[in-house]
Image (tube, grey):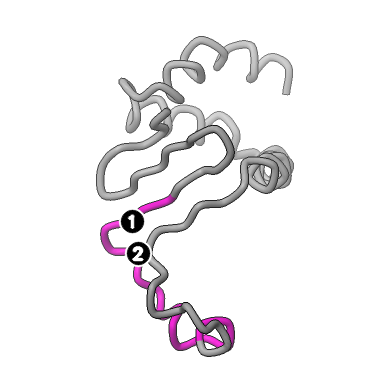
Amino acid sequence: MAYMRGSTYLWRDESHLHVWVVDGYDGWDQTGWGEDTKDAGTASGVGIPMEVMDEYVVMRLAQLLQEGGMDQAIARALAKWDGNFGCAVLKECANSIQRTL
């Protein structure tokens, strides 16, 4: 399932969220983590376990609520990512999410 397709590409399989970004090089190979990782030279995109992403999402949701940024984030997502499967679910649930939160 694709959530975002473009220069930022997020999609999931049965167990991981995969993140690919066209201009996403952030110097990872120069960090302590990169230098200490024997296979660092082969790293490319990122596959993050869905359980970890779920935990991140609820933490970020809490920040958005605290900062008052929920409505703007929903509006941006709907405007930018319409037509992707994950956005279709957001489109169906946006009003309910806004009312509930």
The label shown at residue 21 is 1
Task: Label 2: state its secondary structure.
Answer: loop
Residue 83 spot, x, y in % from top left: 31, 20
Q: Nearer the viewer, residue 91 or 64?
A: 91
Q: Is residue 36 left or right of residue 12?
A: right
Question: What range of the chain is rendered magenta?
Answer: 19-34
Q: Amino acid at mark 2?
A: Gly
Q: CA distance from mark 1 to mark 2?
A: 5 Å
Residue drawn at (51%, 20%) of the image:
90
Residue 76 spot, x, y in % from top left: 41, 33
Task: Label 1: state its secondary structure.
Answer: strand
Q: Is residue 91 left or right of residue 84?
A: right
Q: Nearer the viewer, residue 73 or 8?
A: 8
Crowdedness near tag 1: few (<14), some (14–19) or many (≥20) residues, C-alpha within 10 Å:
some
Q: Which residue is mark 2?
A: 24
Q: Amino acid at mark 1?
A: Val
Residue drawn at (40%, 59%) of the image:
45
Q: Check the image and report above or below for 83 versus 30.
A: above
